[in-house]
Image: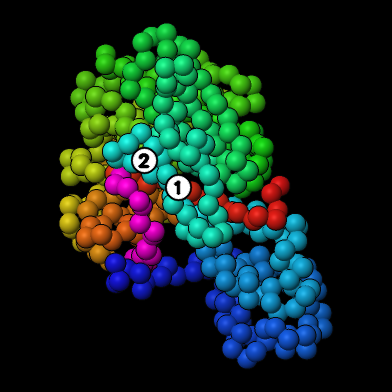
Amino acid sequence: MAESSERRVRPRRAAGGLTDELAAAAGTMEEHGAVGRVAKKIRAPPGVTEDLHMEFLLRLPPELPKHLFRFAAVSKGWRRMVHSQVFLREYHKYHAANPPMLGYLYNQRCAPAAEFVAIVPACFAPRLPDDGRGLYVIDCRQGRVLFHKLGRPCTPESIIVWDPVSGHQNYVSFPEEFESTGGGRWSAAVLGDADDTCVQAISQGGSFRIVFVAMTGEGETSAYVYRSKTSSWSAATSAEKPPTADADYIERKAATMVANNLFFRTSGRTIVRLQFSGEGAELSFLELPPSMAQGAVLVPAPGGRILRSAAVAFQSRYVRFCDTEAGGDGPAEWTPLTSVKLAVAGFGLLGSVETTGEILVGTGGGRGPYVFDIQSRCSRALPKPRADTTALTPLMGFYTPEARY
């Protein structure tokens, strides 16, 4: 893993092109002793107001928090600004579309238990509900995690929506219509409420939705939407599986959101798509190309309206890609792209990062997984899980111990 750990994802250039300049300024100040006691002699140039300072600091990339620490050490005024509720709220809002990765969740292969692996355990290490025992992580989005809580002799199975920052848990029963029909193989996804205007701090007491999709043995697929505002499930949206569909059941893995379309993988090449339109939703089906039949993961492509499929052969250094319109009508037309060389030979793809379009690659030989940026072709190592697993679910968000709002 030595080769991949030496490579770093390049900082994303923020609006106004200030990312590189600010990073260089922070390094220059540190190099010339403008941090600590010497910083007391620093005076802001005439005309540079506190609001302008905040605009500079807001553009520091969240994946490189060391720059914020450097600027906080410049002066007492900047330290107060960086730690203020106003700046933290605005910083979270400014970078809400691309929050950093706090860690990832996974299901143990040999035990009914879920675990969380923190990127920086000393800063953020939340305790899972029931310490992860009897839980199966399915999805994570906008700072919330969705678990399947396995049933016990005196406790029925249910769905848990968990906020790792506040520790708040919501227990939700399965749709009554789903249980009355005898059930089936199902999966689910958690979304923010469409009526909620708070983008990133949406999990802090905000409302949410659960999308529940089930496929019966007879080929019928049904979708239900739960709204926490009303604490109720919608009526079923159903569709018959096409005769040519290659699917027996829906895989219980993280869904992929592209524009207004939510995609679920199945046991075969078939993808179940739930397309939202106004207050309603419509079910349809897509077929992956044969070359993507095994081990493919779905990820949004740049532009926001393209669904990308990625796959890597066992112990291969190359990942294959195919693109299609996320909301297109009719059969999916996949466009193959040029294969990309990985930093380290992959043993399969373990997932993807929906907000950045990155993929999570598994390795062997005692090494841990790593994140691969498709655009920059850079990689960064992730902490190794304690147990074997086949999928990773990234947790993206912000954590500020002093300011939970």
Q: What element does badge 2 sit on?
A: strand
Q: Main secondary structure of the magenta part?
A: loop
Dots 2, 1 in contact, CB < 8 A: no
Percent across and percent down for residue 255 are 40, 37
The colour scheme used here is rainbow
Percent across and percent down for residue 99 are 54, 55
Report the residue marked by disc 1.
Answer: 116
Percent across and percent down for residue 208 are 59, 33
The reply to whether residue 280 is in sight is: no
Q: Quadrant of residue 82?
A: bottom right
- Range of residues picked out in magenta: 376-389
Report the residue marked by disc 2.
Answer: 107
Look at 36% across and 34% down and name the residue there. 112
| Amino acid, disc 2 | Asn
Separation (CA) of disc 2 from disc 1: 9 Å
Q: From the viewer's perspective, is 243 left or right of 94? A: left
Percent across and percent down for residue 365 are 22, 60
Q: From the viewer's perspective, is 331 left or right of 157? A: left
In the image, residue 301 lies in the stretch drawn in magenta: no
Look at 60% across and 68% down and name the residue there. 60
Q: Nearer the viewer, residue 197 or 386?
A: 386
Q: Is residue 100 above or below residue 200?
A: below
Look at 26% across and 16% down and name the residue there. 217
Q: Quadrant of residue 274?
A: top left
| Amino acid, disc 1 | Phe
